Image (cartoon, rainbow, N blue to C red):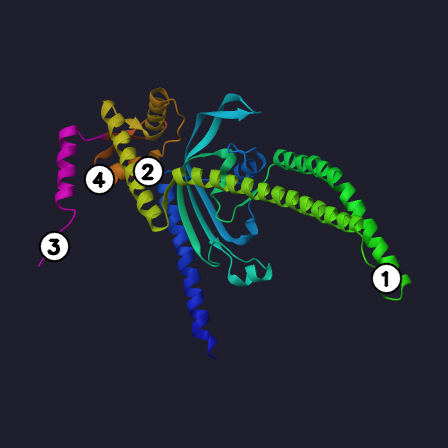
Amino acid sequence: MTPRPFISIRRMKSKCEDNLLENFKEILNNANYEQITETDLAYAMEKESLFKISIFVDFDDFDSQVIFYRGTATRKATLKKWLIQTVETDVPVFERIAIFIKFKDAAYFETKKRKNLQFEPGSMIIKLFKNIPKADMEMLFPNTQVRMKPKDVVLMVGSLIGGGIAVFLKASAGLIAMASVFWFLTRSFVLNGGEMPNLGPAQISAMVAGGSALAAIGAYALKQWNSYKNRKIRFMKILGDNLYFKNLDNNAGVFHHIIDAAEEEECKEAVLGYYFLLRSENGLTESALDDVIEAWLEKKYNVLIDFEIKDALRKLETLELCRITGQNENGENIYQTLSLDAACKKMDDVWDNYFQFNV
């Protein structure tokens, strides 16, 4: 009977998390963000990274994940090719990315025997980034694991094999001499009933040479391992440096950032709707106003935007800055706005009466 309060709290927490996610999506939608599709994620996983690192993300670690973006662009980037040659290429980027992730509980990670986690199981993270290359979205996930690219693996393995053969050839004489001494000791020990024979100067020298050879091989193997670790550290530094300068906000700060952006977008929509209605003496239908605004944005900023005309007209009607004055031959409503002076007077009245306190 005692677990009931705990279950109730858990359900309440789960419900609050669901509400948080839904509100987060609503705010992002108001700020004109769009959800990233599975196709975009697959593109990021398959495409070669701009930062020359290979990253693995285990999506099974997440209980839920939501990624939204706003704005796409193409930026120039200078990349190294081979040793000294550089090339300039166009890189498609997301101008803004908001990411919401909830990890699975501790039991899941215990089952997978995962230790030294960099995050808390069952926790949520919310982050906001800027100018993220489409091919590098996987670096935004908190459970990324840096892996060497095939080219780096080939170079390292080739160096290991080539250097290892050279070291082994140099040390082979010492190893053979040491092996012959071991064989002599083993054979004498068996034939003499367990007595260990005395070693001569030549045999002692052979043992020393063999030990030196083993030490050389061990030192070379350690050097290659350290080289691998250093290369991985360099990759992690590349990842950290790029995320440091592309991170805009975290957790609660993301809400403040996006709410501000949503308010700004709502204001822009209303201003654009009012301005182009004001320019039309005879008013415009909803579809005509939508076409005029989208054409202006394309001409002015060279971008294709699906303008949310219904949202803009709703705000103007709520503020009583526009009204329906008739219909065209197709039965579509024609909207007209108040004059600029009348609109300013109306907005002043709305502002003055926004907060009222009656004793």
Indicate left or right for 155 with 70 as reference: right
Q: Position of residue 263 (x, y in %)?
A: 28, 41
SS assignment at label 1: helix
- Is residue 353 on the magenta stretch? yes
Q: Amino acid at mark 4?
A: Leu
Q: CA distance from mark 1 to mark 4?
A: 104 Å
Q: Position of residue 353 (x, y in %)?
A: 13, 46
Q: CA distance from mark 2 to mark 3?
A: 30 Å
Q: Which residue is mark 1?
A: 189
Q: Which residue is mark 2?
A: 311
Closer to the camera in the image, 201 or 137: 201
Q: Residue furthest front?
A: 201
Q: Amino acid at mark 2?
A: Asp
Closer to the camera in the image, 314 or 39: 39
Q: Label 3: few (<14), some or many (≥20) within 10 Å?
A: few
Q: Which residue is mark 3?
A: 357
Give the magenta-colored segment's residue range: 337-359
Q: Residue at x 38, y 43 (%)?
A: 28
Rendering quarter of residue 93:
top left
Q: CA distance from mark 1 to mark 2?
A: 95 Å
Which is more foreground, mark 1 or mark 3?
Answer: 1
Q: Amino acid at mark 1?
A: Phe
Which is more foreground, mark 3 or mark 4?
Answer: 3
SS assignment at label 3: loop
Question: Where residue 319 is drawn, which disc sits there?
Answer: 4
Q: Label 1: few (<14), some or many (≥20) within 10 Å?
A: some
Q: CA distance from mark 2 to mark 4?
A: 13 Å
Q: Position of residue 83 (x, y in %)?
A: 56, 25
Q: CA distance from mark 1 to mark 3?
A: 105 Å
